[in-house]
Amino acid sequence: LICAPGLAHAGTRPDVAPRRGQWFLDPEFRHGSPAGTLCISFRRTGPGGWDNWGSDKVSIGDLEGLTQQDLASEAHSVSFRLTRDGGTFVCKGSIDGDRGAGTYELILDPNFPAELKRRGIGAPTEAQHVRLVMANCGIALIDELRAQGYEKPDLPTLVKLAEHGVNLDYVRGLQACGYRLGSLARLVKARDHGVDPEFIRGLAD
C-alpha cells in the first residue's frame, strides 16, 4: 500500500470519497506465486491528492470479462469487473499481452455497512467504505482474523489495517510462513517495516 500525498481539492467532503480512477495490470513475478498470477492496482484522486492502492494478486478468473486469450493478444480494448467485499470495480481500458491499464468506476455494495454493523464492527461512512474496498479489507479478512485468534477489530482499527496494507493475502501469507503475530498492532507494525511473506521466504532461502 502506498498513499502518495498531493494537492488537496477544495470543496471535497471528508465523508465522501471519489469512486473513479485508473487501474493497472501487471504480471506477478514474486517468489512462490503460482504461474499466471497477475497484480492489479488502483489509483484515484482523494481529498489529499493521489492515492495508489495495490498491488493485489489476482488470477484471470477473478477478472470477470477477461480470458486467457486476452492475455495472449496484441493490444486491444477490454472491459471487466472485479468484485470484492463491499463493492465492484467496473473497468475499461486496453491490454497488450499480460499488461494493461485503463479507468474504473467503483460501485459500492449497499449491504456492506449493515453487515459490518451486524458483526459488531460498526457502520462505515462512505469514505471509509471506499477505503476498505480499495484496500480489499472486508468480511473475509474479519473471518480470517477470528480464525487465527486475533481480536475483533472495531471500525477505526479495521480502517487502520486497510490504510497500512494488512489485508487477507497478507494475514494468510504470514500464516503460511508459520507466523501469527498475536495482535493487530503487531500486524500493522510488521507491515510498516516490510515484514511480509516474500521477505520471510527470502530469509529462509
Image (cartoon, helix red, strand yellow):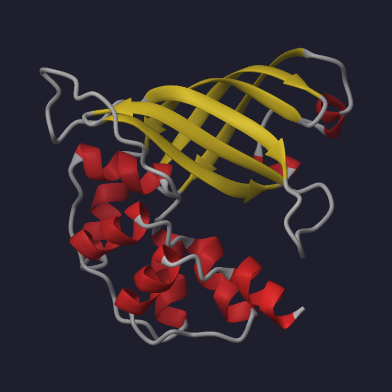
Q: Is residue 86 above or below residue 31?
A: above
Q: Is residue 2 above or below residue 26?
A: below
Residue 142 relative to residue 12: left or right: right
Whole-percent x, y for residue 111 in the image: 31, 45
Residue 205 relative to residue 1: left or right: right
Q: Is residue 111 visible?
A: no
Whole-percent x, y for residue 197 in the image: 61, 70
Image quadrant in which you'd find residue 93: top right
Residue 140 relative to residue 198: left or right: left
Quarter of the picture containing the C terminus is bottom right
Residue occupying the point 86% across, 16% down = 74
Whole-percent x, y for residue 104 in the image: 49, 23
**Which residue is nearer to you in this view: 126 or 44?**
44
Q: Is residue 159 visible?
A: yes
Q: Is residue 104 above or below residue 35?
A: above
Residue occupying the point 33% across, 52% down = 163
Q: Is residue 194 above or below residue 42?
A: below
Whole-percent x, y for residue 201 in the image: 69, 75
**Which residue is nearer to you in this view: 6 or 156?**
6
Report the number of discs. 0
Residue occupying the point 50% across, 63% down = 168
Residue occupying the point 36% across, 57% down = 164
